[in-house]
Image (cartoon, rainbow, N blue to C red):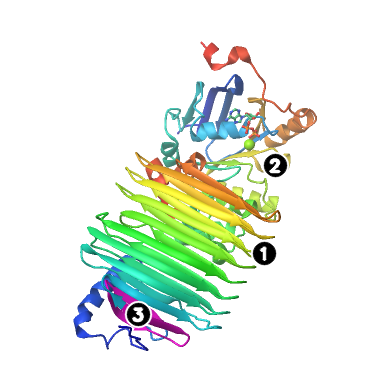
Amino acid sequence: MTHAIRFTPPSGEIAPAWAGELKAMMDAYQQAGGDPKVLELPQVATLVISANQVLVAHEIPGVHFRAESLPHGVRARIWVEPHTRLAQPVHLCFGLLPAEGIQEIVADYEIGDYAQVRFLAHCSFPNAVKVEHRMQARIQVGRQASLTYAEEHFHGPYGGTVVVPQAEVRVEDGGHFITTFALTRGRVGDLRLDYHVRVGAGGVAELVTKAYGKSEDTIHVREVVVLDGPGARGLTRTRIAVQDRAQSRVDTVTEGNAPGARGHMDCTEIVRGQAQASNNPLVIVRHDQAQVTHEAAIGTVNRKELETLMARGLSEDEAVDLIIRGLMR
Amino acid sequence: MQPYLLEIKDLYLAREGHVLLNNVNLALKPGEIHVLLGLNGSGKSTLAYTIMGCSGYTPDRGQILFEGRDITGLSLSERARLGITLAWQEPARFEGIPVGKYISLGMKESSRQRVLEALEAVALPPAQYAYRAVDKTLSGGERKRIELAAVYAMRPRLAILDEPDSGIDTLSLTDIERLIRRMADEGSTVLLITHRDELAEIGDSASLMCLGSIAYVGNAEETRRFYREHCQRHPMPPEPMTLGLESKENQP
Ligand SMILES: Nc1ncnc2c1ncn2[C@@H]1O[C@H](COP(=O)(O)OP(=O)(O)O)[C@@H](O)[C@H]1O
Ligand SMILES: [Mg+2]
């Protein structure tokens, strides 16, 4: 069954059976860094999905949601009409409250030509002991359109979350796609991020990924940026900190396939304790007017940075902590 | 009361057969501005790192006394907590640490007012800078001004300023002098390191570093003249001097 929920106020008209769950979701939303009050503003487009239920789908002019329940999740179509410009970001909130379960979001995002929108997604699994969250997104950024997509996760303290965000992104000519993925509070669990972005002429893709792994957490980031159009630009910026026995692996690929294409991959991973990290940047260039560069710093915190902070009276541990928190911001 | 805030006695530091500091003696009275002049490569920064206690700068011989207490064995953090700090010649950059936060790090009690004052003292409009990160997006000159602001905000007992005038574009020498005087007026003792003798005027006393040694000590004017006549006319050789016999292994 496909149901379109139009102009549903985010509070007030919610089915009573869901109200308690919505309240709990809002608490979870807050833990992931969201501000529940914003979701009550009528001018803010909002989509709230708990497990396989759509709790809120509040549309505003130019922004539309269609959603259908799946056995273990939701299939959603989210589209923004051409030329739409929003003052406030579209708020998305995904979560699963029980300690165990699977949530699979199959989402189709379509950003119309010349539209300029920001999305703020919060994914919260605050009680996760054995939870699996899969996001399969197809994202289309139209010609000269701009999409900024910020996603923040909170997985609670138990480390029992497997998170698999996958995105297939197409940036049309002159389009901008800027995405930030942050999993820096609580445990990571097992993160397997896999983004593939294809950029047309004069388009821009910027992928920022931040994760802080502790205990037995594992982080695997795979990002592929294909610069197909003339003058296309791509940047991956990866910031990882791992401590205890956590493991991190960052595989980034940038292809420069057209004249004037410019790509850069920038990876910093701070390693402490028994943790391990690796970075495998792969550069492929198929045009003599394209250029792709990369830089990486993997390992301990830079000594000079540490000593600079210590010269203000911080202990070495406090200095390391401040540097990592800065990197994760 | 101790006659000296900082006293350095016979400091000697060698690396891989190169003598970086050779029997350095230096004494700073409380509240004074002492200028350490010297050409590039003469060992000024090395001395600054050794006083601060940076890793790799443990002297092979000699003593550093702070208010009469031997601090040669103290860690960098411990020295900073005694009130010693350093404005780096080329300050490090930090992702995600806001300028305002960075400036407040050394303050005993965090005060917004003091952070604003410090930013204004280095001619950076707080509204424009306080929430920016101390990262690569700042120019070298902006970063250096923030370093000076952070030291000023801390009200240190001893401020070691390593070439505060280098790379600062629009902040004039007069502005830097004013800031250094302000630090001294607020009770900081200043060790001002520079290779430009124009800045030496501000010093209550001065010394001249040459090839890792203190070659001259006197008032600012005399030292400046000596520097002009003896150093600036005879530029240093590019490599530090090699004294194989004095490398660490051969020390008694
Ligand atoms: N870590 C080091 N190891 C070996 N030599 C060094 C090191 N740091 C500086 N030097 C050398 O010591 C000399 C003094 O350097 P420095 O203290 O930076 O001089 P200044 O600050 O006066 O320009 C230079 O010749 C420099 O090449
Ligand atoms: Mg120097």
Q: Which residues are magenta?
A: A45-68
- Mark 3 and mark 1 lie on one chain; the one further toward the N terminus is 3
> As drawn, is A275 to the left or to the right of B158?
left
Numbered-mark total: 3
- C-alpha distance separating marks 3 and 1: 37 Å
Q: x, y percentage for residue B228?
A: 77, 33
Asked if the stretch drawn in magenta spans residue A53, the answer is yes
Image quadrant in which you'd find residue A126: bottom left
Q: CA distance from mark 1 to mark 2?
A: 58 Å
Give the amino acid type for the residue marked by disc 1 in the picture. Answer: Pro
| Other-residue count near label 2 (Cα within 10 Å), few / some / many at <14 / 14–19 / ≥20 | some
x, y percent for residue B84:
48, 40
Is disc 2 on the same chain as disc 1?
no
Hey, what amino acid is under mark 2?
Glu
Which one is in front, A66 or B34? A66
Q: Are marks 3 and 1 in contact (CB under 8 Å)?
A: no
Give the residue at mark 3: A67
Tell me residue A196's x, y (percent): 49, 61
Image point (38%, 79%), residue name: A46
**Does dot 1 land on a helix, a strand or a loop?**
loop
Toward the viewer: B84 or A69?
Answer: A69
Residue under label 1, please give it: A230
**Which residue is under mark 2?**
B201
Residue at the image point whose x is 53% and y is 23% from the top: B9
* Chain under callout 3: A
CA–CA distance in space, label 2 to label 3: 75 Å
Share a chain, discs 3 and 1? yes
Q: Quadrant of ligand 2?
A: top right
Label 2 resides on the chain identified as: B
The three-letter amino acid code for the residue at tag 3 is Ala
